[in-house]
């Protein structure tokens, strides 16, 4: 186990670079840190954000990092130099999620507060103009966006909303018509409370969602719940699949990180490293190492034991 020291306040988000050599972290101290995982030291501290940073995402080739937070700006950074490249999205309120599609074409950002006539979701070409945002969502106008992520084939964008809806957007049809279009299948799935996090399985067949204390696994093809995982004593707040899809990690405000078998729903391991509320979990590319962070400024890296 390795502990990374550097942040001065809660850590809200983590992401490994595609080559596994760098970990990006960000949080309430308004900084984004790029860690050299060979040495455990900070390579760069990115300081342009003016408020807490809630979300980070690498582009597929690892050259750019997208970041977003309460200052309402999505920024792109050069990972090799730590220098800002561009400010690309302004939304009506704090940005709760950023995602870059696996094919490198799309950048998505969402926010958690509605204003009349304003969208809570923006999707654009990484090097181009935005699609026209939807004028309305289901039931509540433009639902607030709490989390989002692209499918591994980049054909769908999944958006977890504050009203409990999981909405799938069809990126192929949206690109053709230059406006965001929902998937034609019945993919509006409802939770009893807001969705705090979501993750696609590596094969794209399953989406894991976190709402309240419960983790749900959904069959993407038929839009139905397949498994329900319970065990967190307080809100579950983060979720990640291992690269081979054999492990699901969740972190919660009960201070624990839990590892699950996503095929059976069985809990396989539970850790409590004194991070306080666990806000983020992430797997490295090799699937043998993972990271967790929370209310503590520290970040924990550990070797994942797969001898189940």
Image: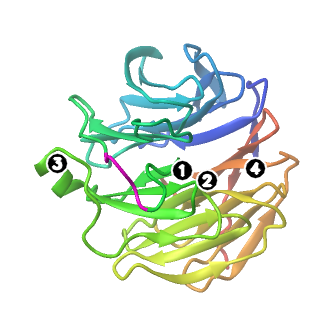
Tell me which residue sits at (61%, 16%) in the image.
Answer: 50
Q: Position of residue 163 (x, y in %)?
A: 57, 59
Q: Are marks 2 and 1 in contact (CB under 8 Å)?
A: yes
Q: Nearer the viewer, mark 4 or mark 3?
A: 3
Residue 163 is left or right of residue 183, and the answer is right
Tell me which residue sits at (72%, 77%) in the image.
Answer: 267
Q: Earlier in the sequence, mark 1 or mark 3?
A: 3
List the residue tagged with mark 4.
278
Say which element carries label 2: strand
Say which element carries label 1: loop
Question: With respect to residue 127, does 208 lie above or below?
Answer: below
Residue 135 on the magenta span: yes
List the residue tagged with mark 2.
289
In magenta, the rendered stretch is: 134-138
Is residue 112 visible to us here?
Answer: yes
Question: With respect to residue 147, does 228 lie above or below?
Answer: below
Indicate how the structure is coloured in the image: rainbow
Q: Nearer the viewer, mark 4 or mark 2?
A: 4
List the residue tagged with mark 1.
284
Question: With respect to residue 77, does 300 lie above or below?
Answer: below
Looking at this rendering, what residue extends furthest in the left direction?
A: 176
Q: Nearer the viewer, residue 169 or 27?
A: 169
């Amino acid at each position: 186990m390795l502990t990374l020291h550097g942040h001065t306040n809660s850590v809200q988000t983590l992401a490994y670079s595609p080559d596994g050599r760098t970990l990006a972290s960000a949080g309430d101290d308004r900084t984004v840190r790029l860690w050299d995982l060979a040495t455990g030291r900070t390579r760069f501290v990115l300081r342009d954000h003016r408020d807490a940073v809630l979300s980070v995402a690498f582009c597929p080739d690892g050259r750019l990092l997208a970041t977003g937070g309460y200052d309402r700006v999505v920024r792109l950074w050069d990972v090799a130099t730590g220098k800002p490249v561009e400010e690309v999205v302004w939304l009506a309120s704090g940005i709760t999620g950023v995602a870059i599609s696996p094919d490198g074409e799309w950048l998505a950002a969402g926010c958690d507060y509605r204003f009349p006539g304003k969208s809570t979701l923006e999707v654009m070409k990484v090097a181009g103009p935005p699609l026209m945002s939807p004028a309305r969502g289901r039931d509540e106008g433009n639902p607030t966006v709490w989390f989002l992520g692209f499918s591994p084939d980049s054909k769908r964008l999944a958006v977890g909303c504050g009203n409990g809806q999981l909405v799938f957007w069809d990126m192929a049809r949206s690109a053709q018509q230059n406006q965001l279009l929902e998937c034609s299948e019945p993919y509006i799935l409802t939770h009893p409370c807001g969705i705090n996090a979501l993750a696609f399985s590596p094969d794209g067949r399953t989406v894991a969602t976190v709402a309240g204390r419960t983790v749900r696994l959904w069959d993407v093809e038929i839009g139905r719940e397949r498994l329900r995982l319970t065990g967190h004593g307080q809100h579950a707040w983060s979720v990640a699949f291992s690269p081979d899809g054999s492990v699901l990690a969740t972190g919660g405000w009960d201070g624990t990180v839990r590892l699950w078998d996503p095929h059976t729903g069985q809990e396989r391991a539970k850790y409590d490293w004194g991070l306080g509320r666990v806000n983020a979990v992430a797997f490295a590319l090799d699937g043998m190492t993972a990271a967790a962070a929370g209310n503590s400024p520290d970040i924990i890296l550990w070797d994942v034991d797969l001898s189940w």
